[in-house]
Amino acid sequence: MSDTETGTPDRNVLFIVARATNGCIAKDGDVPWQISADLKRFKRLTMGKPMVMGRKTFDSLPGLLPGRRHIVLTRDAEWSATGAEVANSAAEAIALAGDGDYSVIGGAEIFALLADEATHWEITEVHEDTDGDVFMPAPDPAEWAETGRECFPAADGWPPYDFVTYERAGEPSA
């Protein structure tokens, strides 16, 4: 199936991230939270799909995540890692992802670079102002419409959080 105007394949491009109230998404090269339900949701949403990420995000993973391709977008033409597919441009990363659905998992520079590709966001909104060193804005309400929200109370030493789905404003749900 193709988009009749552009001739590009129809596909879902999921941007997935955990983000604090103040926009923090990382601290010292890692996600500041290890909320079990968030990690399980991440796995469910990315399983079986290529994941596009920056090198710092790749380095923050505990290793290769089973059942998913790891496409690492980096400016370093010499960089490589076992099990990772390397792209040195956004176009190369998109080409490596192929015609099917794929996920973009960070970091902030990669989200900004590939913003036009996103069809929807899955954000874990962590209800606290978190100390960190990587921040990103929330999706622009002029461009993105909230289409789902699940709220969870604080538990296991972690703050309350919501799972929130956003779709491009004006586009029908898939």
Image (tube, rainbow, N blue to C red):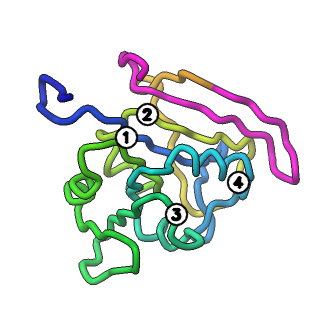
Image quadrant where one finds the N terminus:
top left
Say if mark 1 contacts mark 3, CB within 8 Å: no
Q: Say whether disc 4 or disc 1 marks the residue closer to the N-terminus.
A: 1
Image quadrant where one finds the C terminus:
top left
Q: Which label belongs to residue 13?
A: 1
Q: Which label belongs to residue 120?
A: 2
Q: Which label belongs to residue 130?
A: 4
- Give the secondary structure at mark 3: loop
Q: Which label belongs to residue 166?
A: none
Q: Say whether disc 1 or disc 2 marks the residue closer to the N-terminus.
A: 1
- Give the secondary structure at mark 2: strand
Say if mark 1 contacts mark 2, CB within 8 Å: yes
Q: Residue furthest bottom?
A: 78
Instruction: Find disc 3 in the rendering and name its residue.
Output: 66
Q: Position of residue 134 (x, y in %)?
A: 54, 59
Residue at 74% in and 52% down? 36
Q: Which residues fall within the magenta stretch? A: 149-174
Residue at 41% in and 55% down? 51
Q: Position of residue 65 (x, y in %)?
A: 53, 64
Q: Is residue 83 left or right of residue 10?
A: right
Residue at 57% in and 40% down? 123
Q: Spatial distance from mark 3 to mark 4, Cα to Cα?
A: 29 Å
The stretch drawn in magenta includes residue 168 = yes
Q: Residues within 10 Å of mark 2 (few under 14, many from 20)?
A: many
Q: Say whether disc 3 or disc 4 marks the residue closer to the N-terminus.
A: 3
Give the residue type that dot 1 points to.
Val
Nearest to the eye among marks 1 and 3: give it: 3
